[in-house]
Amino acid sequence: MTSTDFSIPVTPAEDGAETALTPGQIFRQRLFGHTGFLIGAGLILIIVVIAILAPLIAPHDPFAQSLSARMLPPVWVEGGNWDYLLGTDQNGRDYLSRLIYGTRVSITIGLGAATVGLLIGVTLGVIAGYFGGWADHAISFLLTAQLALPGLLLAMALVFIIGPSIWVVIGIVGVLHWTYYLVVTRAATQRIRSQDFVAAAAASGASPRQIIWHEIMPNLLSAIIVIFTFELGIAILAESSLSFLGVGIQPPTPSWGLMIAEGKQAMFYRPWLVILPGICLFLLVIGANLMGDGLRDITSPEGRNE
């Protein structure tokens, strides 16, 4: 069952009669007609493919150092070398290879942290929205306390205390970014709980667990997916901020935030050391945001696509 009513567009048939589109046709029409979603999904797809194929397409070992090839400029700048298309860093490591392998770090941390936040936020949001009462008050207090905390400073402190690693960053960023999931799922669950099909399921003897899994969660799925895409970009930015400040991913692991931090001292006479990882970070985050914004429009009842 579903609580969302979609208007059914019609298309003229060859004989002049009007034919109603099926829900699947409506969805595909919105999906392939939304420019922002297609651009965002295309960017994400390209970056994911680069991350998967990194060992095959990287021209050099991203960890190999060559002191004789330190700080080489990109090939389009005087002094550039075709062996190092985007130049090298202060340790003589190929910059293109490190950017390619950096996609793996960003994608892994983004997906991992967004998933951790999803599990925490959706669980708390559904419990608060469905059961209400003291559970709702307790979770609302927890939400207020979380929103009052300085997220970046708290993340820095926790990573510093526990010790920086990819898995620690995933866990801490995820634990600190669940509030959007909670707010949206709590409000949506409260609305869905009052629908007739939920009352019918309860009257037929379904347990709260069965109602949550079979009646409420399917109606929350589209909203959760949209939030997940936005949280993906937020988690990637959070990791880059921590790495830039020196408490996130540690060298020699290639991370875009760390590469920006390493290149900032030479940014006035080697600006590409900061600009190139900044462009990669921008493309990944804007791709996630465009895809999330497109999914929100595509799955809305009004079809906000025009």
Image (cartoon, helix red, strand yellow):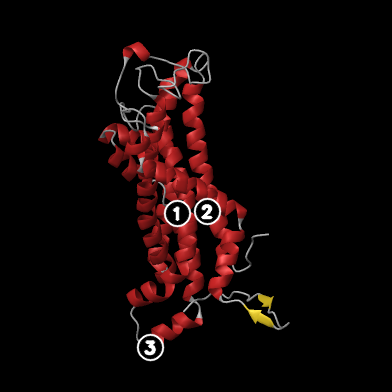
Residue tagged 1:
228
- Marks 2 and 3 sit apart, C-alpha to C-alpha, by 37 Å
Helix, strand, or loop for circle 2? helix
Give the amino acid at mark 1.
Phe
Q: Nearer the viewer, mark 3 or mark 1?
A: 1
Give the label on residue 292, or none.
Answer: 2
| Residue 4 relative to residue 166: left or right | right
Q: Which is more toward the observer, 179 or 227?
A: 227
Which residue is painted at 41% across and 52% down in the image? Answer: 178
| Image marks 2 and 1: residues in contact by CB distance under 8 Å | yes
Helix, strand, or loop for circle 1? helix
Q: Is residue 115 visible?
A: yes
For marks 2 and 1 on the same chain, the one whose residue lies earlier in the sequence: 1
Q: Nearer the viewer, mark 2 or mark 3?
A: 2
Give the vertical position of 226 relative to 73 (above or below): below
| Image marks 3 and 1: residues in contact by CB distance under 8 Å | no
Give the amino acid at mark 3.
Ser
Please provide percent x and percent y for residue 140: 43, 57
